[in-house]
Image (spheres, grey):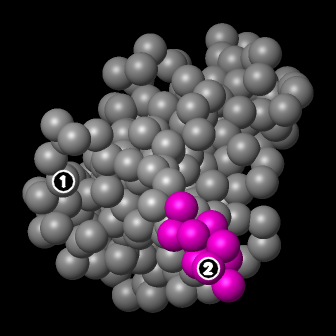
Amino acid sequence: MRTMLMIAAVACAAPASVQDKPRPDDRPPWSALTSPSAALKVAFEEVCLPAVVDNQPVETLAVQRHLISVSPKLAGFSGDVKVWRLASLGPVYVAAWGDGTCSATSQRGDPEALKRQVLAAVAARGLTLAPGRAVDAQADGINQAFCGSPPQPVVVSIITPANKQSRRGAIFINLFRAKGERPSFCGPELGETPR
């Protein structure tokens, strides 16, 4: 019994990996509590964007930016996904999917302003994206694709409310690298004329 207690004590006392904690000199993103733009900056620009573009682990980035792990069901996700929530007045989530997609969502904010913020953040990383198809999404939304060039083009899918009466949150973003050719919903490649 005593041996079991010692093993349990050692297991509990074992330090977590340095990368699985916020950095000691890193202050929590306090402005994200009240600002949808600041919250999206953390969730998309500081977690999803480096995760997909620089191939960094979403979990490490999320924990370093003070997000906490939550049940996918709590956030409305299902399937092979891990989810973290940012402290904010409106729900702000980051999700890491089994296929390498990173999603960021915000219930609050001006959808068009947040969409511009996302596209500006991608452009600031030196990625050139062209608008692809826009299609209807669930819960009165519009899903607009923005796509880069092969090989493995970066794809951003931005879902925003279709109108002011929509039940949908302000923005839902999926960011991923296409596994092969440019997806058909991207439309023609940059500089290519449609047939």
Q: Quarter of the image for the C terminus: give it.
A: top right
Magenta span includes 163: no
Front position in the image: 16 or 32: 16
Magenta stretch: dominant SS?
A: helix
Residue at x 72% of width, y 77% of height: 78
Q: To which residue does mark 2 refer?
A: 2
Residue type for callout 2: Arg
Residue at x 56% of width, y 24% of height: 54
The relative height of residue 161 versus residue 62 in the rendered view (above or below) is: below
Residue at x 54% of width, y 50% of height: 59
Q: Where is residue 73 in the image (x, y as percent from the top left)?
A: 62, 85
Residue 137 position by quadrant: bottom right
Q: Is mark 1 on a helix, strand or loop?
A: loop
Q: Position of residue 70 (x, y in %)?
A: 51, 76
Viewer-nearest of discs 1 and 2: 2
Q: Position of residue 17 (x, y in %)?
A: 50, 43
Q: Where is residue 125 in the image (x, y as percent from the top left)?
A: 42, 20
Q: To which residue does mark 1 refer?
A: 28
Mark 1 crowdedness (10 Å alpha carbons): few <14, some 14-19, many ≥20: some
Residue 179 position by quadrant: top right
Residue type for callout 1: Pro
Residue at x 66% of width, y 11% of height: 191
Q: Is mark 2 on a helix, strand or loop?
A: helix
Front position in the image: 11 or 183: 11
Q: What stretch is highlighted in magenta?
A: 1-10
Check the image and name the residue furthest to the front: 2
Is 27 left or right of 122, judged from the image as shown?
A: left
The relative height of residue 55 versus residue 174 in the rendered view (above or below) is: above
Front position in the image: 57 or 21: 21
